[in-house]
Image (cartoon, rainbow, N blue to C red):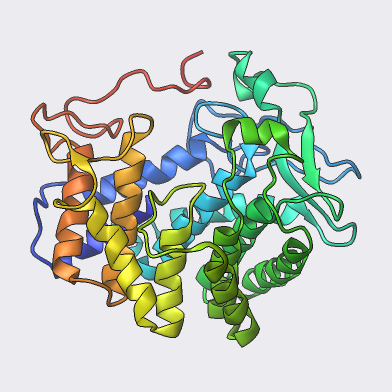
């Protein structure tokens, strides 16, 4: 969704590939998707077939863990990808607020990201120094095809404490909170401060449990295995610096980046690898040429003439599984780069639009992969609540 706001702005500031698309409608429908994913007691939810669900979610000390987003068409709260999505959506709102405003979706967008942020606030018990990284068991969930509303028992919870590792999932949650605090600073100062306080204390906790969460939350790793943790630590620290102007965070962000990053362009920007985003943010905060050149290397690796193959219709094809997300996420980075003076802004925006427009029907079959948009699109998506 965040890239659509950027595309909406890009069409007003550069020569477009094709602007015959209803961006306001697509933003509206994108926000509704996240409402379809909501767990807990539903408020501000406009999906007629969704009701309150998984209301018995509790932590080991009785903490209320209701809320958040279910994962894809399944019914688990996986915090690593959920936090990554929240970070991206919050940054999209931060940089392209005007696009949501013009689409008449600004309040809906604030409500959207607040839903996951409220959940993350529940997941961090600073007094007990416990962070809840997952609610629901992936293996059990995938063995049962049922609606969220039909779950009448408490779901298993998975947590991290001082005896476990997991600065990847914790760090990404910090990033989401920090980005959220930036977004809500002018909207709701008290809520922004609450997010900032939790983000800073959770970041301190993340430094005590450095490592990937794979061994200590093995069920989550079966579905979202983490490769490294330094990329999330880099992103979280950089966003905390942008939020607080505390130079210590920037020093720690660069230190985390230098522990692992190379001059080879990242393979992708996704829920596991945040390097491309970290490089953009580090350039924003330091203006060092190395971060600019490495961001350019990532974007151009996805553009024609780069390292990816293209389909006959012009989609940058990274991988069979979730092929659209890779080009969409690269488009998001391309737009962020253009927004912040990295690369050729017009070519970056034009390329990003070409990828997103492909997804909504600008291809040789005039087939839209965005459900509900265009004259031809998928009719039976993988979603339990809708099709039971």
Q: Nearer the viewer, residue 110 or 12?
A: 12
- Please give the name of the residue rendered at 28% of the width and 54% of the height, measured from the top-left corner: 331
From this viewpoint, is residue 290 visible?
yes
- Please give the name of the residue rendered at 49% of the width and 29% of the height, measured from the top-left corner: 48
Q: Nearer the viewer, residue 321 or 31?
A: 321
Please indicate whether residue 252 sits to the left or right of residue 290 in the image.
right
- Please give the name of the residue rendered at 60% of the width and 56% of the height, measured from the top-left corner: 172
Residue 309 drawn at (x, y percent): 20, 40
- The part of the image, by quadrant, that contains residue 360 is top left
Please indicate whether residue 120 sits to the left or right of residue 59 in the image.
left
Please indicate whether residue 162 sits to the left or right of residue 20 in the image.
right
- Please give the name of the residue rendered at 19% of the width and 70% of the height, measured from the top-left corner: 345
- The part of the image, by quadrant, that contains residue 181 is bottom right
Residue 217 drawn at (x, y percent): 73, 38
**Compared with residue 330, is residue 288 higher up or lower down, i.e. above or below?**
below
**Compared with residue 318, is residue 251 higher up or lower down, i.e. above or below?**
below
Residue 376 drawn at (x, y percent): 19, 25
From this viewpoint, is residue 11 visible?
no
Q: How many marks?
A: 0
Q: Nearer the viewer, residue 278 or 181?
A: 278
Residue 53 drawn at (x, y percent): 67, 30
């Amino acid at each position: 969704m965040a890239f659509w706001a950027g595309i909406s702005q890009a069409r007003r500031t550069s020569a477009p590939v094709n602007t015959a698309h209803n961006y306001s409608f697509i933003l509206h429908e994108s926000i509704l998707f996240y409402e379809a994913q909501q767990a807990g007691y539903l408020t501000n939810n406009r999906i007629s077939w969704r009701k309150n669900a998984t209301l018995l979610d509790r932590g080991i000390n009785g903490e209320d863990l209701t809320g958040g987003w279910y994962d894809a068409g399944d019914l688990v709260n996986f915090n690593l990808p959920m936090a990554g999505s929240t970070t991206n959506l919050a940054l999209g709102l931060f940089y392209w607020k005007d696009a949501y405003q013009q689409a008449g979706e600004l309040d809906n967008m604030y409500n959207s990201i607040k839903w996951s942020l409220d959940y993350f606030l529940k997941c961090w018990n600073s007094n007990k120094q416990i962070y809840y990284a997952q609610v629901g068991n992936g293996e059990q969930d995938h063995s049962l095809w049922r609606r969220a509303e039909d779950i009448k028992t408490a779901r298993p919870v998975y947590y991290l404490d001082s005896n476990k590792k997991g600065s990847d999932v914790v760090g990404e949650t910090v990033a989401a909170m920090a980005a959220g605090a930036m977004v809500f600073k002018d909207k709701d100062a008290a809520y922004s401060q609450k997010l900032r306080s939790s983000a800073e204390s959770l970041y301190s906790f993340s430094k005590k449990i450095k490592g990937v969460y794979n061994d200590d939350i093995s069920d989550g790793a079966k579905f979202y295995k983490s490769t490294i943790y330094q990329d999330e630590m880099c992103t979280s620290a950089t966003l905390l610096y942008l939020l607080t102007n505390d130079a210590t965070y920037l020093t720690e962000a660069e230190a985390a980046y230098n522990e692992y990053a190379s001059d080879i362009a990242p393979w992708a920007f996704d829920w596991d690898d945040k390097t491309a985003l970290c490089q953009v943010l580090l350039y924003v905060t330091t203006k060092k040429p190395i971060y600019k050149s490495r961001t350019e290397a990532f974007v151009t690796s996805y553009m024609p003439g780069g390292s990816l193959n293209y389909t006959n219709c012009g989609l940058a094809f990274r991988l069979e599984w979730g092929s659209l997300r890779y080009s969409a996420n690269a488009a998001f980075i391309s737009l962020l780069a253009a927004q912040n003076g990295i690369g050729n802004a017009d070519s970056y925006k034009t390329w990003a639009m070409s990828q997103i427009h492909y997804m909504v029907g600008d291809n040789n079959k005039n087939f839209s992969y965005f459900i509900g948009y265009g004259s031809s699109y998928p009719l039976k998506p993988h979603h339990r609540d809708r099709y039971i």
